[in-house]
Amino acid sequence: MKYIEALREGERIQEIYLCKQKNVAMTKTGKEYENVILQDKTGSLDAKIWDPRSMGIDDFDALDYVEVSGDVTVFNGQTQLSIKRARKAKEGEYDPSDYLPVSDKNLDDMFNELLGFISNVENIYYKQLLSKLFIENQEFAKAFKNHSAAKSVHHGFIGGLLEHTVSVTRLCEFYTKQYPMLNKDLLITAAICHDIGKVYELSSFPLNDYTDVGQLLGHIVMGSEMVGDIARTISGFPKTQLVELKHCILAHHGELEYGSPKKPALIEAMALNLADNADAKIETMTELLNSNSSASSDQWLGYNRLLETNVRKTSELK
């Protein structure tokens, strides 16, 4: 099998991929075509069926495994596939494990590191909240461990939510050493909890798409509600400590236009926003460069929406 990350412009392929999305669109001239998103464990691929009614294009739906034949092209710096033939693959023709993207880091090791951060929290109320969520609630812990952090953009793979959370928590721990004014227990607890709502905002793989409640509320509001619900089960949980924790979660995207209902008003909320933004953007750049590993340092890869700029690989030192 040729994985998506290995596809190169100019190749003609015949491979089986998971169809993640499929929808009908129109060209500027009014001609109907189909947008298809294909996926394997190495990533996703934008594909087009320019003539859906042509011979050799069989009917298939999203979440079907599909054998496609076509030409690999590049448009705006992104690899695409122009599909010439397609058919729904039969059971036994594919191994499902080849089609689910997974973190290249060990999930058990990362989860144990997360538990280590929790064990070091000294505030008894924050520690109880974290324990109820990640230790006592095994169903949630399992879902969190295997969930993605996004539909696309960054950490959009199994274990992505855990990997992102551990990375953000590491950065926040560094901030507490660099800036002693920060309340360490508040910041570490907020870092661990900042994206817990994504477990319910996004469905699990292979769909990995927004749920109905995710569309209506979003992970930021959902995460704030979750910590509030847990805090109510802990006797004597100080109201101020809960409000400050909820504020950090609500403000972690930093700006109203980025989905946060509040801008950071606490130094811990500011630190969390910086850590979250740093990890998300560096991971986005890393994934982009890895998916274009054959590109030279003088080849621009096109405009990236999250990074808001055209990007390229750094030149090698000589």
Image (tube, rainbow, N blue to C red):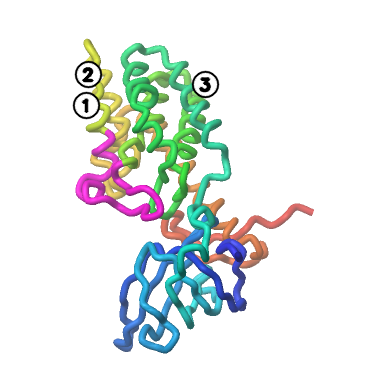
Disc number placed over residue 260 in the picture, else none: none
Instruction: For mark 3, give the secondary structure.
Output: helix
Q: Which residue is mark 1?
A: 229
Going by the numbered disc 3, the residue's amino acid type is: Lys
Q: Is residue 217 magenta?
A: yes
Look at mark 3 in the image and give the residue it sits on.
Answer: 177
Name the quadrant containing residue 48.
bottom left
Q: Please, what secondary structure does the residue beneath circle 2 have?
A: loop
> From the viewer's perspective, is residue 202 above or below residue 121?
below
Instruction: Tell how many labels.
Output: 3
Using the numbered discs, state the Cα–Cα distance from disc 3 to disc 2 in whole angstroms.
Answer: 32 Å
**Residue 11 occupies quadrant:** bottom right
Front position in the image: 36 or 221: 36
Residue 169 lies in the magenta-colored region: no
> What amino acid type is highlighted by mark number 2?
Thr
Q: Locate residue 37 relative to residue 316 in the image: left or right.
A: left
Report the mark closest to the observer, 3 or 2: 2
Residue at which label 2 appears: 233
Residue at image coords 58%, 62%: 3
Placement of the C terminus among the 4 image quadrants: bottom right
The earlier-in-sequence mark between 3 and 2 is: 3
> Left of 109 or right of it: where is 56?
left
Q: Which residues are magenta?
A: 200-223
Farthest residue in the front direction?
A: 92
**Residue in the image at 40% along x and 29% along y:** 192
